[in-house]
């Protein structure tokens, strides 16, 4: 069965960095685009970034562009989110999510989600 | 960016009720719309893709409709396990965006 397990969350001061990981199993990881989605406490869902199945392209929401970097290791079936210059407003549960369709589909929706990892940015 | 407006934001209903949630897009998105269910402390679950395609394992009491700018999610007979928050999402263009959510609570 498909499993997505995030890790790397925690409490960090504004301006610092954090790297999230997502370990994938149960599907052919290198065939699917992958996403990061976040949810601030008590708030709605917010898409963060996508990386194509082969890592050849990435897209970000404007508020994280230039600060966050999505990457993947298709040999290890891992997805990453490097978060730099963190702000208080980045505080959220971060989910990794698998694209519904393989290869040339790059906009979702998201068929499977991890359990999420909480990032708290606070001084 | 494509904005999605869900209504109502809160809905109180009884078991067995027919419930309809609407989602309006700020511009036409054809059928590039999905619906998710989220329960407290859990990740969202994909219910419907392409506006009306029920995902495998999702009960047939759920149905989706619409195209262009106006969409609906209908639960034909609300069950106890359906009390949750529902989100629509447009998958037409980046940034991918979600509606604000509709919380369905027990009357």
Image (cartoon, coloured by chain):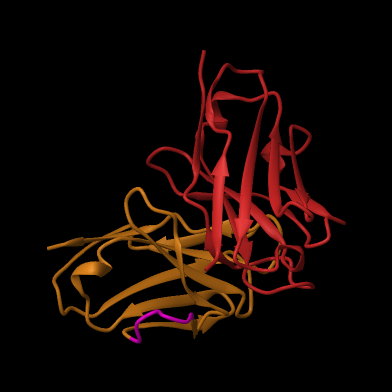
B61 magenta-colored: no
**Residue B88 seen in the current view:** yes
Q: Residue at x 44, y 59 (%)?
A: B44
Q: Please identify the dominant SS of the magenta region.
A: loop
Which sits in the foreground, A4 or A64? A4
Above or below residue A41? Residue B44 is below
Q: Position of residue A22 (x, y in %)?
A: 62, 47
Q: Residue at x 15, y 62 (%)?
A: B106
| Image quadrant in which you'd find residue A65 | top right
Q: Residue at x 78, y 56 (%)?
A: A74
Which sits in the foreground, A34 or A28? A28
Q: Position of residue B54 (x, y in %)?
A: 47, 83
Above or below residue A114? Residue A64 is above
Taking the view exactly as shown, the residue that stands out farthest to the top is A123
Q: Position of residue B103 (x, y in %)?
A: 30, 58
Above or below residue B6? Residue B57 is below
Taking the view exactly as shown, the residue that stands out farthest to the right is A56
- Judged left or right of residue A21, residue A94 is left
Which sits in the foreground, A114 or A2? A2
- Judged left or right of residue A10, residue A102 is right
Quadrant of the image containing the C terminus of chain B:
bottom left
Tell me which segment is drawn in magenta: B55-60
Q: Position of residue B38 (x, y in %)?
A: 38, 59
Which sits in the foreground, A95 or A107? A95
Colour-to-chain, red: A
- Judged left or right of residue A26, residue B40 is left
Colour-to-chain, orange: B
Quadrant of the image containing the N terminus of chain B:
bottom right
- Judged left or right of residue A19, residue B7 is left
């Amino acid at each position: 069965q498909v499993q997505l397990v995030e890790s790397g969350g925690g409490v960090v001061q504004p301006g610092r960095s954090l790297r999230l990981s997502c370990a994938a199993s149960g599907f052919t990881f290198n065939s699917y685009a992958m996403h990061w989605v976040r949810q601030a406490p008590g708030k709605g869902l917010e898409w963060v970034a996508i990386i194509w199945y082969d890592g050849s392209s990435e897209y970000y929401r404007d508020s994280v562009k230039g600060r966050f970097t999505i990457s993947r290791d298709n040999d290890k079936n891992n997805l990453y989110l490097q978060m730099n210059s963190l702000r208080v407003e980045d505080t959220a549960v971060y989910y990794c999510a698998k694209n519904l369709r393989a290869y040339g589909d790059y906009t979702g929706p998201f068929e499977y989600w991890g359990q999420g990892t909480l990032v708290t940015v606070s001084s | 960016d494509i904005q999605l407006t869900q209504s109502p934001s809160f809905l109180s209903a009884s078991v067995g009720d027919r419930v309809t949630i609407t989602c309006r897009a700020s511009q036409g998105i054809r059928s590039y719309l999905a619906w998710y269910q989220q329960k407290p402390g859990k990740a969202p679950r994909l219910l419907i893709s392409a506006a009306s395609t029920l995902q495998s394992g999702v009960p047939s009491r759920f149905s989706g409709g619409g195209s262009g700018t106006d969409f609906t999610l209908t639960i034909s007979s609300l069950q106890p396990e359906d009390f949750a928050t529902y989100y629509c999402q447009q998958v037409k263009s980046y940034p991918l965006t979600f509606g604000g959510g509709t919380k369905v609570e027990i009357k």
